[in-house]
Structure formats: structure tokens, C-alpha cells
Amino acid sequence: MTELKEQILKVLGTNPTISLSAEKIGRLIKKETADDFKPLIQALAQMERENLVEVTDQGEFKLVPQQQEIVGVFHGNAKGFGFVAYDETLPDVYVNPDHTAHALTGDEVKVKILRAGDPTKEQGPEGEVTEILEHHYEHVVGEFKNLTMGNFIGEIILKDKKLANFRFFVTDQGLHPQDNEVVTATITAYPSDESPEILTGAVTEVIGDKDEPGIDILSVIYAHDVPHEFPKEALDQANAIPLHVLPEEKVGRRDLTDQPLVTIDSIESKDLDDAVVAWKLDNGNYHLGVHIADVSHYVKPGTPLDQEAYRRGTSVYLTDRVVPMLPKRLSNGICSLNPNEERLAMSCEMEIDPQGNIVKEDIFPSVIRSHARMTYKAVNKILEAHDEKTRQEYRELVPMFETMAELHRILLKHRHQRGAIDFEAPEAKIIVDDLGHPIDIELRDRGLSERMIESFMLAANETVAEHYFKLHVPFLYRIHETPDADRIKNFAEFLSVFGIQMKGSLNDVSPKMLQKVLKDVAGTPEEQMVQVMMLRSMQQAKYSDEERGHFGLGAKYYTHFTSPIRRYPDTTVHRLIRWYAENGTGAEAKAKYDGVLKEVAEHTSMTERRGIDTERDVDSMKKAEYMEDHIGETFDAVVSSVMKFGLFVALENTVEGLIHISVMQDDFYEYLEKYMALVGRRNHYIFQIGQPVKVKLLRVDKDQREVDFELVNPGDAPITKLRAPRQDDRRGGRGRGSRNNGHRHNRDDHRNSDRRRDNGDRNSYQINRGQTRHKGDREPFQRRRRHR
């Protein structure tokens, strides 16, 4: 009942001056069935008794006046206004420039509702920031410039676009860096009425000279607060761990060293955390063994190693380096399943029938020995190219690889039958020279071996999740919730514009419905466009102590079990498995983790997002740096997004950039929001997502991660019968001569149509098409691509 009341309060809180019927409230909080209605009425009756809501003469409900303040996260716009996000399912609160209290993007704020939203018109509320509860920015990173002005010794040039409107002056209370050094500084004074665009503070650390190799990436690491230096206590603990398995450590573990387990990874991988084995059983079923490095044996709760691993949450994979979750002595040493060496593991053995159903499982600690360090390339040569030399080299293992391929196809078919969604987006690897300068961008090819390992990891993750869910014990899950109904309806409306129908109930969307859409558009010009818009309609996967299923995989149960070297949630899952094995599943055993896992889930979801954002920023920066060497060249591209201020385009090498409307000089282009298209008023050329174009590189700004193009042959675009309404002509003033000014300031407003989240980050709309460096458990359907 408490959760239901909170949902009702959130809906009424954004509409405090209007009343809503019980049926309308039910629709807004997705409680529309007959079974939902009785608890809804009971909750409303209880809330009336508690004086939280009142009933109007028309029998509708409205919030009592004292419930008009909410808490949320502020997201500012370069023009001064902002939005406060407080609930994923409800409209953000608009805040005009006079009512922001000088909040910065990311600040947690308290907001008073000034004007109610109107859900019947899809209009959000308007509010005023009354208090900044917690500042998001506590420090900044940037380039120091000497400056003598009063008590200030210099200025830091801020590269963060969310702070683009602000200047940062350095006091003499901290370090005194040299000109052009990249530094970090703590913020001691935030914007105020007297200095609305000024931040001040003291330099606390000098990262290095801006022209020194590697400093650019290091500055991004600092900017995102990614821990990258291990405390001495954690290193001392790691260095005290033996580099081989001790006899006493094998006690109580199943010895699997005779099984022909192998690791299959990319050539450059050094942290090998999973080994697999498979064979055909006499009953026609398959045995699949997924054996994962037992990091939890070495990283004990509460120790310095554990505290640092929790703080990091995940390894962060950058262009020319890795910021690991664990010291190398563990990640590349005793925890890495190196060939012909005994290792401690957590094993998940599955019996799988020819239809892909897991009919039996066994999860236990083990001792294993990898019989070969295989690479994707080598296994693909065996299975796809049938390369005789490679098949001869690994002749003893070839029959097992063929069995694995057979099992993979069965598992893949099983996932597709239940509706799992699978996007095929290109993945890029940025090649740099010894100085860290990018010299090439290679596309990764996901062959049969990569997909095979992915199938096996998914199977293990699902099996472990279902096993412990059915034991009714506290556990950590990986969830991907059902998309918001309004977003799905918007997506379906978008599809209908192009004659594409999504069959099924939009109020009860299933993965199979979306899978069918992708199947229908496969190989058509609309395919890329539909994938992009479908991804934008999805929720973001995260960790939870409650099992809510994984929509994108079509899985009822899911967790992360397979990568404890680089993900803290997997280490936690191993720890839980051991705890229940040793202590049972009674009330006393459950009590240890009851209530603890919620905090772990929230923290590791945050560190995952931090890692993704860091990787995205480094990729964008290095791609921009690569393009600096190609200014003036022409490229084939595809329109990846259309905004009122121009076109975003993607090259074949995954580099993305902007064609600003100010350089589209052949016509006056107007934005048709319903069709997500720019249409020329005179020639009627149309530009939409997925459309091929030829572009010329005009400008690159590495610091701002900006790449600007122009169209080479705009006349090659198709002609449309669509016409934009001419309200602007009647309002007086936007003829061709004034077009550029009318659009230039909108360049960074494109996120306003998507919950107004990122202040001017023009790359934030993008689906990250960059590296998927981690094997086996990708989430290709997600907005930010990663970490199944």
C-alpha cells in the first residue's frame, strides 16, 4: 500500500491545482486493470483519512495544499532555464531562469510547484527551486591560465559542457600551477545573485601539462571521479596473496581439473575470468559448464581490497588503458584463468535439452585448469573459415568447439522464440600510436565464437538468478524493466508514419512485439532509423535486490555472475552463493544480507553509469582527435538523428558529427517533429534518420568532442510531398536571411524533447556505437549498449 500511495502522491503532486478521477489516476500510474482498481480505491480512501488528498464535489481527488514540494535532480540549459527530474514515469518540472536559485546540472534540489501540469494536454508542471540540497559538482578539472585579478591567481578553462556558461577563478589558498597545466580544483563558492556565472576555488592537484601524452584521457578520468590509484592498504593485501593455489584452499571444492575447459577471449585480453566446456550426453541433451574465477575467495568483505573494489564498482576500459577494479596481481594473476594453471572457480553446470531448456543445474565452488587459451579469431577460423592449419593445431578440441556451436544455435533459437531483442550495431576499436594519438578506427567483427560465448554467459546468468530466486533468499539481480507505456505509444506512432505497424497491446508491450518490428524492417532503408527510435524507447538496465525480469532478453530471471574480475555485482553474487552453501537458507542466514543488497545495487548501478560516461567521453574525444587529420575530406555517412538545428550523421567508422542547419544553404529547412525530418521549403528535399548522405568535414574541436560536416550534394536527397506549416511567416520574421540566427542557439537543445537531461551535450542523444570491450554478456538493445 505504501508504494501505491507514493505513486498517487507523485501524480497529484505535479497537478496540485486540478482534480483527477480515480480512473485517470489509475491510467497515469499504470494501474488500469480490474484487479488493480480495488487496491487503488482503498489507497485513496486511506489517503483521504490521513488528510493527504481531498475529494471534490465531482468525486475526483486532489492533493491537499501542504503537499506541493518535491525533491529531484536539476538539469540546466545553456539559456538559463532548467528542468527537475524526480520520477522516470512523470513529466519533469520546468523552471524558468528566474527561479533556478543558481542550481547547476546534477544538483539535488527542492522544488515548489507554481503551476500545475495538465496530463490531458501532456503538459508538465512549472516550479521554483527553493533549496539546493546537495551540489553535484564539488570539484572541476581543466586547463590553468595565469591571471592576476584581485585575490585570484588564475582561471581554469572548463571543458565540461554542462558548465559552459560559467567561469572558474582560482584563489591563492591552494597550489600555484604553471600556465597550461591541467589541474583539479575544489569549489569553494558557487554561483549567486552577485556572481551568477562565477565559480571559485583552490587548486588541489596538478595532473600534468596539457600537451603531455595521456594527460587528455587522465583529465577525463579525473573529471568523472573515477578512482584510479589503489590505496597502499589494498595493494599490500593484494601483494600478500600467493600466486598459486594452496592445497588447503582446495578443501571442500570439486576437482574439475581433468575436464577440457578452455578460455575464449580477444587477443589483447589479460584478465581471463571465464572458462567453458561442453559435450553431448547419452540422453541427447547437452552438458554446458561455465566456470568463473572465484574472486570472492580472495576479496573478503570489509577488507581494504573489498572496500576499494566496491568504491570502483567496475573496471573502466579506455582507448589505451584500463582502470581496473582489482590490482593486476589479482586481475591478471591468481584470478585470471591462465592456461595449464590451477585456479579456484565458481562453477555453473547445466544440462540443456535440444530445445534449449535448462533441465538441471548445479552451482558450486571448484578447482579448475584451463586446457587452452583460445582466441575468438582462432575459434572463428575453426568454425567459420574451416582453416585446416588452425584445425590441425587444436585437433583435440575441434569436436568440442563444434558441439559448442551446435549448442549455441539451440540457445539462440530458444531466446528468439521467447522474444529476446538483439540489435546489431557496429563496434569500433580506436588504434593509437605510442604517444596516444589515434591513427585508425577499426570495426570489430562479431563472429560465431563471440556469439557462442555470449550465449553461454547468458545461460549461466539466467540459471543462477532463477536458482536463487526460487530459494526465496536475498539476492542481487540485473533487471531491465518494461518500457514506459507512453514511450512505446510514441514509438508506435512514429512507426505508423512510415507505414510500419506494431501488433499487440501497447499497454502491455512484450519483447516479442519489438522483435517482430525489427524482423519486419530488416534489410530495409528504415532499419537503422527504427533501431535508433526503439532504443530510445527503452529503459536502462540496472542492478536491484528485487527480481523484475530482463525485458530486452525476454528473461524472467537474470543476474550478473560471469565477470567478477571487472564487476563488483558479480563478486557479490559469488559471495552470496558461498554464504547460502555454507549457512543454509533459513531465517538467520537470510538476515545477513536482508536490506544490505539494495545499497549495493544502487551504488554499483551508479558506478556502472560513471564508467559508461567516462568511456563515452574518451571515445568521443579520441574520435574527434582522429578526425582532425581529415579536415576537408569527404565521407559516406548515414543520418543518425534529426533535430530542429540540423542533422547528426554517422560515418562507417562510427564517428558521429553535426551538419548544422546554418551550413545547409541550398534551401530554407524546417523541422517536422511528427516525422522527425528536415524539409526544404522551396525544393522539398527531405532528410530523415537512416538516410545515406555524402558529407565533407569542416571543423573539429577535440576539447568539446565536436565534429562538424556539411552536405556535399544536398540535391541527391529524395523529394517529399510533406509540407511544413507556415506559422513563422505570419509571425513576421524568419525569412531566409534570418534563418541561421533563428537556429544557431538551438544547437544544444536537442535533449529537451527527451526529458531535458543533458545541458548542451550534443553527443548525449547518441547510442554509443563504440567499443564493447567486454565479452559474453552484451546488452545491445540498451541506449548505452553495455554490460548485459
Image (cartoon, helix red, strand yellow):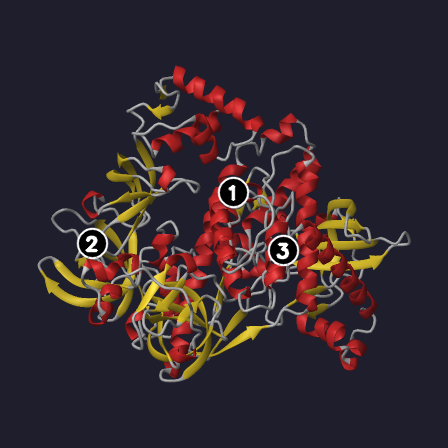
| CB contact under 8 Å: marks 3 and 1 | no
- Measured in 3D between alpha carbons, the distance from the residue under mark 3 to the one under mark 2, in whole angstroms, is 52 Å
- Name the residue nearer the viewer: 150 or 108: 108
Residue extending farthest to the top is 49
Q: Earlier in the sequence, mark 3 or mark 1?
A: 3
| CB contact under 8 Å: marks 2 and 1 | no
Q: Say above or below: 292 vs 30.
A: below
Residue extending farthest to the bottom is 633
Left or right of 502 in this view: 737: left
| Residue 43 x/y as whole percent | 47, 22
Q: Can residue 348 be seen at all in this image of the molecule?
A: yes
Quadrant in which residue 388 is drawn: bottom right
Point 15% across, 62% down: residue: 153
Nearer the observer, disc 3 or disc 2? 3
**Badge 3 is on which residue?**
516
Left or right of 535 in this view: 176: left
| Residue 670 x/y as whole percent | 32, 65
Nearer the observer, disc 3 or disc 1? 3
Task: Specify few, some or many for label 1: CA neighbours under 10 Å numbering under 14, 14-19, or 20 or more.
Answer: many
**Disc number placed over residue 601 in the picture, else none:** 1
Left or right of 702 in this view: 236: right
| Residue 413 x/y as whole percent | 73, 57
- Measured in 3D between alpha carbons, the distance from the residue under mark 3 to the one under mark 1, in whole angstroms, is 32 Å
Residue extending farthest to the right is 282
| CB contact under 8 Å: marks 3 and 2 | no
Task: Specify few, some or many for label 2: CA neighbours under 10 Å numbering under 14, 14-19, or 20 or more.
Answer: many
Q: Which of marks 3 and 2 is nearer the N terminus?
A: 2
**Badge 2 is on which residue?**
199
**Disc number placed over residue 367 in the picture, else none:** none
Quadrant in which residue 337 is drawn: bottom right
Task: Specify few, some or many for label 3: CA neighbours under 10 Å numbering under 14, 14-19, or 20 or more.
Answer: some
Amino acid type at mark 3: Lys
